[in-house]
Image: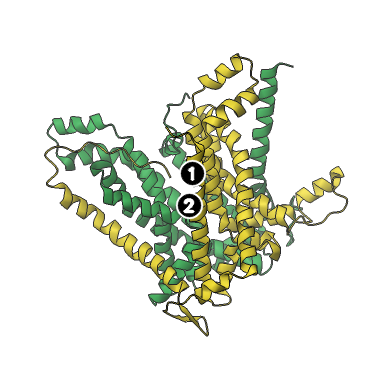
Chain colours: A green, B yellow
């Protein structure tokens, strides 16, 4: 057999297996959510939308969905608002202070989740501000800060310096150059950073649980509670909603931004 | 994390205005990080030296009671297991992610975007969901067990968890998208001419990949492995749900200490120990890799 052909077959086979591994748990959850019966069986025995109806009419699940969406929206807006001046100061002024702040942000992201969760639960305890939704919002926005800082830095780097110089040559001040060149170039990166933080915050469990889990029930907390206290098919619907939200968010991200570049590819790519 | 932006050359006339602008820009982020990062970190360390009182309470102090408790065989065993688990996960996931990232970076643009969206979607999925999905997948009534029985690989249908292998597979699943995406930039920067030259000179593609491509990306591979260790050494949900008590990690001890037994100072000391061990491991690897590379 031709060696090149063999290599292609091996490569395709390997990639298909990895894709199967990545897809398997998701397929299982989606399948189980359409099960007619109460039991957790896969492949589903009788197809039914009954648990979807149950999910969307259950006040508890809807409240959790609302809580989760509120937390993620606020956390992503705060994280990006804080990250923007840091990334800008690093790019525009090469500021050491800004670099230090960026370093603290990414260092915090690298700490194990259980350590940061404990740290914040102690912090809010000492502040005497326990079990509130804003604890989760603020904890998420600071933990995830490293992501928008990194993504926005990629964005600033991509701005053509020649364009700014041209704006200055034509008599534009810093503010005008910012409005004409920097802002339009940065919009897709800001949107991408918002989406990314939103999705990660939406899915975060441990910090939310340890900071305010007993009074603020986010969707992951509710899923986990129902997982521990006995199986309940509606939680599969919650899971499917997560999968769909994440997939929609990242497809949107691919549509508004240059995904390969955002993920760190510098070389141009043929279509 | 990606490298920070290359600075734009500042204008000659701007400097006298810069400090003011800069202070204005950075005052909010600085305040934010002091209040929400440095103070909580300080509290965590302080808590680990605090005196424990009944009912989940504690009083600030400077005692080593909690650290002495870490020196027991039970804790050391759990800590050793956590690091073994993390290192095994690192080796397996990097070995898998390396070729995947390489192949993805060589695909056409559309195929690349499809893979990237798929990876990002799984990467963002809550650990809660993934653990649950594995529970269904590995359960006695799940499709996998049925298939194995039908194929005759398995004699009788029984659940494939809790055990070490289930914990391991789930952890690899959790970190795989991160590591593929982490290696992707380095892979897409690789020059295709060099492995091509190797194949022209008679090496098989697999051989060219292992002997030519792999050494070129040794640095990123090592960093990827360390990243996996960092991500998994504090793992909590996966070993809790898919493992037996023998597979419990420091993460579970910390969370139990904080939420169940109410011994916050001990949990804090365990957290500080975990992070110190992590930092120590990072330093050691750095030292070794520096000693290993020729000084030039």
Tell me the quarter of the image containing the N terminus of chain A: top right
Q: Residue A250 carries which label?
A: 1
Q: Which one is nearer the viewer's eye here, A131 or A217? A: A131
Q: How crowded is mark 2: few (under 14 residues within 10 Å), some or many (20 or more)?
A: many
State left or right for residue B36 relative to residue B115: left
Q: Mark 2 lies on which chain?
A: A
**Residue B32, horizontal then vertical, whole percent:** 32, 61
For label 1, the SS is helix
Q: Residue A199 carries which label?
A: 2
For label 2, the SS is helix
Q: How many marks?
A: 2
Q: How crowded is mark 1: few (under 14 residues within 10 Å), some or many (20 or more)?
A: many
Mark 2 or mark 1: whose residue is earlier in sequence:
2
| Residue visible at 76% across and 55% down in the picture | B160
Residues tagged 2 and 1 counted as in contact (Cβ below 8 A): yes
| Residue visible at 57% across and 73% down in the picture | B69
Query: Is residue B2 among what the camera can see?
Result: yes
């Amino acid at each position: 057999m031709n060696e090149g052909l063999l290599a292609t077959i091996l490569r395709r086979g390997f990639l298909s297996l990895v894709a199967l591994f990545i897809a398997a748990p998701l397929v299982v959850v989606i399948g189980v959510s359409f099960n007619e019966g109460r039991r957790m069986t896969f492949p589903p025995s009788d197809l039914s939308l009954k648990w979807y109806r149950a999910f969307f009419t259950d006040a508890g699940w809807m409240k959790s969905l609302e809580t989760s969406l509120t937390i993620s929206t606020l956390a992503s807006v705060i994280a990006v608002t804080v990250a923007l001046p840091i990334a800008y100061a690093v790019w525009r002024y090469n500021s050491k202070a800004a670099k230090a702040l960026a370093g603290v942000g990414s260092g915090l992201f690298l700490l194990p989740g259980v350590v940061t969760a404990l740290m914040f639960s102690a912090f809010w305890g000492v502040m005497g501000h326990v079990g509130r939704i804003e604890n989760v919002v603020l904890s998420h926005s600071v933990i995830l800060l490293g992501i928008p800082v990194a993504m926005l830095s990629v964005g600033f780097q991509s701005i053509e310096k020649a364009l700014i110089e041209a704006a200055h040559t034509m008599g534009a001040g810093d503010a005008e150059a910012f409005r004409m060149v920097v802002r339009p170039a940065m919009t897709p990166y800001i949107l991408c950073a918002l989406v990314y933080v939103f999705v990660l915050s939406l899915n975060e469990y441990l910090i939310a649980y340890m900071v305010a889990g007993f009074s603020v029930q986010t969707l992951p907390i509710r899923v986990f509670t129902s997982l521990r206290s006995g199986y309940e098919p509606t939680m599969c619907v919650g899971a499917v909603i997560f999968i769909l939200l994440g997939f929609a968010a990242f497809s949107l991200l691919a549509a508004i931004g240059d995904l390969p570049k955002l993920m760190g590819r510098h070389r141009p790519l043929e279509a | 994390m990606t490298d920070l932006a290359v600075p734009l050359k500042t204008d000659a006339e701007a400097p006298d205005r810069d400090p003011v602008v800069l202070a204005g820009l950075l005052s909010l982020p600085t305040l934010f990080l002091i209040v929400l990062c440095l103070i909580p970190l300080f509290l965590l360390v302080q808590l680990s030296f605090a005196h424990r009182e009944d009912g989940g309470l504690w009083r600030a102090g400077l005692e080593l009671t909690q650290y002495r408790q870490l020196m027991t065989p039970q804790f050391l065993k759990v800590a050793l297991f956590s690091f073994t688990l993390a290192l095994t996960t690192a080796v397996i996931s990097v070995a898998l992610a390396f070729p995947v990232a390489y192949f993805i970076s060589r695909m056409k643009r559309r195929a690349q975007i499809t893979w990237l969206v798929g990876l990002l979607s799984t990467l963002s999925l809550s650990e809660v969901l993934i653990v649950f999905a594995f529970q269904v997948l590995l359960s006695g009534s799940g499709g996998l067990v049925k298939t194995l029985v039908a194929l005759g690989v398995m004699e009788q249908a029984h659940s494939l968890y809790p055990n070490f292998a289930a914990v391991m597979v789930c952890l690899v699943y959790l970190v795989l998208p991160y590591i593929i995406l982490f290696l992707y930039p380095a892979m897409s920067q690789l020059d295709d001419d060099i492995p091509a030259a190797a194949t022209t000179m008679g090496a098989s593609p697999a051989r060219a990949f292992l002997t030519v491509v792999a050494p070129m990306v040794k640095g990123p591979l090592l960093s990827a492995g360390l990243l996996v260790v960092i991500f998994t050494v504090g793992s909590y949900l996966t070993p809790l749900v898919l493992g037996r008590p023998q597979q419990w990690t420091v993460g579970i001890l910390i969370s139990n200490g904080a939420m169940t037994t109410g011994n916050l100072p001990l949990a804090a000391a365990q957290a500080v120990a975990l992070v110190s061990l992590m930092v120590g491991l990072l330093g050691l690897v750095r030292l070794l890799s520096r000693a290993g590379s020729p000084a030039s």
